[in-house]
Structures are given as structure tokens and as C-alpha cells.
Image (cartoon, grey):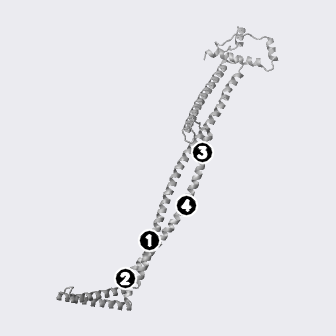
Amino acid sequence: MATSHLDDDDDFGGDFAGNRRPGGKRSFGEIDDDEDDIFGSKKANSKLEETAPGVATGMILSLRESLQTCKDELAKYEMELESAKSEIHKWHSSFQNESFIPPATTPEPNLVVNYIRTLKSTDKSLKEQLEKAKKKEAAFIVTFAKREQEVAELKAAIRELRAQLKPPSLQTRRLLLDPAIHEEFTRLKNLVEEKEKKVKELQDNINAVNFTPNSKMGKMLMAKCKTLQEENEEIGNQASEGKMHELSLKLALQKSRNAELRNQFEGLCKNVEVLTTDVDRSNEMVVILQEKLEERDSEIKRLKLELQQRNITEEMNDSAPMVTDEPQSTTEAVDVPQIKLECNTEGEF
């Protein structure tokens, strides 16, 4: 019974029920061959056979799990590659619809890069034009400010002249206090009163006589009235001569100057309006070009991101075969007996 027990323990897989395999004891010749074996392949095979089959099944399960993960990763990478291809196709179709690509041609990267370079050059030229326009605008603003200052000075001068033409009450009082002017004024006043008295007397006489214009008395009275009127006009002209005449001449000159300045100011206003319209147009063009530049910059950023994603996918595709090769190398390290165990235990899984 002891011998049979020892024989059962010496069999491969004797510790596990249902997994016993038929086998015999080795002879002394086989032991000698094992000693002569330098690489120890036979010993390794015997040790692997002596190990429990549960370790082999664990190895198989781990290899299957790693293979399944590799398959999942490969499927994921394939999905990413398809999405990248679809994105590339979308960009390709979008560039085909652009006006800078000639018809019946494919959108090549060189065309896109050249178009972007032309856009950058146009952007630089437009910026230079904008700077020139700003300088011109500043110069026109300075000239306009100078003109406004001159107009304000002229308005102040006109106000002073108007104030001089309308002297205040104090100045008139000072003129009346002058003895020569006072005497002249009183004399003229007395003359006017006398003349008024004479006119009244004559009117009374006319009303009393009831003469006609064709009568001698009527003609004489009309002649006297005319002479009196002429005398009054001469007195008024003498009084108004002098400073009033000079001031009237100055006023006429100032009016002519004001008319010239008004004409010049109107011309300047028209020039400023034309310049403001030009500046508004240039500002609108600059805004439109800035919007186009922003759109192109966003497109460039998207293309860069797409290229980075493409490079990442290519690197992942290049590294995917290396990942799949590693389980194969591990499986190659397992010897022939282990493969036999896998074939036998495959029905249990």
C-alpha cells in the first residue's frame, strides 16, 4: 500500500483529483542524460510538468485578458483613426469650397500656407495704411483746432467792434460833458425848437388862409419848408460826420472780412466732412479685415490641433504593434509541454 501511495504521489498532478496523467518513473539513464544537458531544458520541462495546472490556467487567463485589452485598445484606436479621417475629409471639403483654390484641383497644404502668407502680408500693408491714416487724421485735427481758434479770435474781435459801435451810457455822458459838444448840441436843439415853432405858425397861417398850392402864398410857404428841411438835413449830416463815418467804414471792412472768413470756414468744414467719411470707410475696412484675420487664425489653430491629433494617432498606431508583440514573446517563452496543457484544459473554459 505504501508503494502504491508513493507511485500516486510521483505521478504528475497526483495532488489534484481528476487531473492525473499516466506516466512512468525514469530510469538511471535518463538521469544521466539530464546531468549531461548543459542548458537544463529537460529539467525545466520536468519542473514545469511538476507544477500545478492551476498556475498554467492563471497564465492563460492573464494572457487572454491582456489580449482582450489589446483588442479593445486597437478597436478604440481604429475608432479614433476613423474620426480623424472624417475630420480630415471635412477640412478637405471645406477647403475645396474656398475661392482661393482653383476649380478641379485638390486643396494642397502649400496652397493653404501660401494663402495664409498672403493674408499676413495684406494684414501688414493694411496696418501700415491705418497708421498713415491715423497720422493724417491727427494732422487734420491739429489744423482744424487751429482754424477753430482763429474763428474764436475773429468772433471775439467782432464782439469788441459791436461793443464799440454801441457805446454805453457813460461814454455818451462823457461826450455831453465836453463843452464844445454841449454847446453845439444846445445850439442845434434851440434851432430845432425855433424851426418847429415856425412850422407850427406857418401851419396855422395856412389853415387860416386856406390857400391852394397853386397860389403865390402857397408856393412861398412850400419853398420855405423845403429850405428849412434842407437846413435840418445839413445840420443832421454835420452832427453825424466824424467818428460815425470812420466807424461805418471800419464796420464795412469788418463785414467783408467776416464774409471771407465764413467762406473759408465753410470750405474747411466741407474738407473735414470729406476726411471724416474717408476715415469712417477706412475704419470699416479695418474692422472687416480684422474679422477675416480672426477667422483665419481660428482656422489655423484648428488645423494645428488636427495635425497634433493626427501625429498622436500615428504615434499610437506605430506603438500598437509593439504592444501586441509583447504577449507573443511571453507565449513564446512557454515551452511545448505548457502548450499541451493549454490544449487539454481549453474545454473547461
Instruction: Identify the element where label 3 is drawn.
Output: helix
Question: Residue 116 shows which numbered tag?
Answer: 3
- Give the distance between the C-alpha atoms of the residues marked 2 and 4, in whole angstroms: 52 Å
Instruction: Identify the element where label 2 is drawn.
Output: helix
CB atoms at circles 2 and 3 under 8 Å apart? no
In this rendering, the label closer to the viewer, 1 or 4: 1
Q: Which of 110 and 4 is in front in this view?
A: 110
- Give the distance between the C-alpha atoms of the residues marked 3 and 4, in whole angstroms: 30 Å
- Give the distance between the C-alpha atoms of the residues marked 1 and 2, in whole angstroms: 31 Å
- Give the distance between the C-alpha atoms of the residues marked 1 and 3, in whole angstroms: 57 Å
Instruction: Identify the element where label 1 is drawn.
Output: helix
Which amino acid is tagged 4?
Lys
In this rendering, the label closer to the viewer, 1 or 2: 1
Q: What residue is at 72 percent from the left and 13 percent from the top?
A: 10
Residue 125 left/right relative to 322: left
Q: What residue is at 66 percent from the left and 22 percent from the top?
A: 59
Which amino acid is tagged 3?
Ile
Residue 45 left/right relative to 152: right
Identify residue for label 4.
Answer: 136
In this rendering, the label closer to the viewer, 1 or 3: 1
Considering only order in the chain, which callout, 4 or 3, is on the residue closer to the N terminus? 3
Residue 183 left/right relative to 149: left
Residue 211 in the image, given as x and y percentages of width and height: 18, 87
Identify residue for label 1.
Answer: 259
Badge 3 crowding class, 10 Å Cα cut-off, few under 14, some 14 to 19, many 20 or more, is some
Considering only order in the chain, which callout, 2 or 1, is on the residue closer to the N terminus? 2
